Image (spheres, coloured by chain):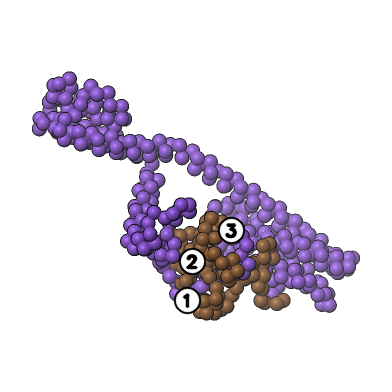
């Protein structure tokens, strides 16, 4: 993006907090350095001063209220929302019926006011549904306060019904997105596994040719460099998987990945020990190895944020121990 | 085996910064600190002085939040549960 002087603080929030430094807890909106949804085109409708004052605070509280309502609807099931809609219709019909009981504020059918009897209740129910679905036949009309109730009912019912329909549509979509995520994720895990297998077999070949001294050291170094770079990439993926898990990994898959990681690391250790002392590592190789060690040392049973089964913890601890040996 | 590592190997190469160096940078005000975690995470806790720029908004909002392309910028994420 054209930024020339960017640096990465790898320790992140965790290291910062562990070192005893304070953390700030103001939210984005409160810092005032940014306001949500700034207009990008056209002149601003309000002056800077107006925005900076109570205006922006109101904006954010409206935003918060909006988010809250959406959240609430999001948590409710479709069936529950539909039942709420039915409930609203029933309550409204009861309201019309009560209005009919008092005489002045009920419903009128062809010039005749409906009474507070059972027939009146059924007619009120009918009118309520006609209003809530915004059909409005007009065979029965409200008078007095029932008009206010009818308007409120049709607005509320329309909104709730809209939410029900939206949920119906988005449910399937959400499912699909989740499925796609899972498939992509599984494919990535497959790639991690096959790459780690390649790293292990390459390292094994290199160890045997190093011990037999059948290849020039420089050849071994080149192949080692390529293998270590691949190893580093997959180690980084696994490290992310353990430290920032977003999707669930099957225990069997994770166990196989960790076992292969441990094997590859052990192979790396043996190969480095086998290489003659006069051998100087190239800079990329040196960097890749130290990055491998640093990442691997970060993998152990108690330094990842989740609890894992003893089998996985065993592999993680072993990875850390081997990394320490290499260092 | 050398113990200090400052460069990650995968492209693009972003130099790393240590905790100690970061403290000095923040004290002198030389660097702009960017929190790429979610706004919720930012609200629960962030390094003092950090600007919130969630990863998914980097492309859309970076030019607005970080207009100076030559300024020193330090980014960080979580390693947090």
Q: Chain of mark 3?
A: A
Residue A113 seen in the current view: yes
Q: Are marks 2 and 3 on the same chain?
A: no
User: Which residue corresponds to the image point at 82% horizontal and 75% vertical from the top-left?
Assistant: A279
**On screen, A221 above or below A119?**
below
User: Which residue corresponds to the image point at 58% horizontal and 51% vertical from the top-left?
Assistant: A250
- The image shows residue A281 at horizontal and vertical percentages of 79, 72
- The image shows residue A247 at horizontal and vertical percentages of 54, 52
- Residue A114 located left or right of residue A189: left
Q: Which chain is purple?
A: A
Residue at image mark 2: B51
Q: Quadrant of the C terminus of chain A?
A: bottom right
- Sequence-first tag of 3 and 1: 1
Q: Which mark is residue A241?
A: 3
Q: Residue furthest front?
A: A43
- Residue A227 located left or right of residue A184: right
What's the CA distance linking mark 1 and mark 2?
A: 17 Å
Graded by Cα atoms within 10 Å as few (under 14), some (14 to 19) or many (20 or more), the crowding at tag 1 reads few
Q: Which chain is brown?
A: B
Q: Which numbered disc, 1 or 2, marks the residue closer to the eye? A: 2
| Count of number-bearing discs | 3
- The image shows residue B49 at horizontal and vertical percentages of 47, 71
Residue at image mark 1: A21
Query: In the depicted view, which residue is nearer to us: A84 or A272?
Result: A84
């Amino acid at each position: 993006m054209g930024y020339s002087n960017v640096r990465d603080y790898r320790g992140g929030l965790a290291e910062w907090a562990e070192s005893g430094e304070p953390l700030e807890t103001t939210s984005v909106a409160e810092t005032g350095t940014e306001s949500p949804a700034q207009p990008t085109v056209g002149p601003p409708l309000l002056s800077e001063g107006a925005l900076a004052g109570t205006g922006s605070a109101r904006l954010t509280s409206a935003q918060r209220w909006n988010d809250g309502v959406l959240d609430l609807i999001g948590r409710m099931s479709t069936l529950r929302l539909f039942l709420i809609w039915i409930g609203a219709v029933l309550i409204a019909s009861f309201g019309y019926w009560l209005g009919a009981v008092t005489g002045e504020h009920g419903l009128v059918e062809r010039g005749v006011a409906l009474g507070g009897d059972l027939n009146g209740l059924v007619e009120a129910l009918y009118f309520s549904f006609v209003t809530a679905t915004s059909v409005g036949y007009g065979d029965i009309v409200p008078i007095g306060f029932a008009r206010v109730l009818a308007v409120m009912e049709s607005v509320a019912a329309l909104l709730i019904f809209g939410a029900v329909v939206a949920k119906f549509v988005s449910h399937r979509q959400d499912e699909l997105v989740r499925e796609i995520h899972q498939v992509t994720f599984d494919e990535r895990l497959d790639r991690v596994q096959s790459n780690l297998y390649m790293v292990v077999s390459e390292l094994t070949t290199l160890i045997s040719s190093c011990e037999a001294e059948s290849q020039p050291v420089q050849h071994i170094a080149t192949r080692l460099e390529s293998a270590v770079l691949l190893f580093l990439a997959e180690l980084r993926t696994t490290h992310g998987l353990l430290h920032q898990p977003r999707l669930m990994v099957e225990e069997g898959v994770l166990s196989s990945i960790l076992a292969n990681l441990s094997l590859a690391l052990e192979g790396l250790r043996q190969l480095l020990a086998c290489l003659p002392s006069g051998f100087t590592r190239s800079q990329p190789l040196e960097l890749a190895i130290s990055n491998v060690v640093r990442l691997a040392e970060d993998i152990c049973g108690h330094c990842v944020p989740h609890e894992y089964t003893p089998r996985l913890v065993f592999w993680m601890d072993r990875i850390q121990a081997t990394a320490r040996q290499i260092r | 085996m050398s113990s200090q590592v400052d460069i990650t190997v995968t492209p693009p190469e972003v130099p790393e910064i240590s905790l100690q160096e970061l403290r000095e940078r923040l004290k002198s005000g030389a660097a702009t600190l960017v929190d790429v975690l979610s706004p919720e995470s930012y609200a629960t806790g962030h390094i003092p002085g950090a600007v919130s720029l969630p990863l998914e908004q980097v492309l859309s909002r970076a030019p607005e939040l970080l207009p100076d392309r030559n300024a020193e910028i330090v980014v960080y994420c979580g390693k947090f549960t």
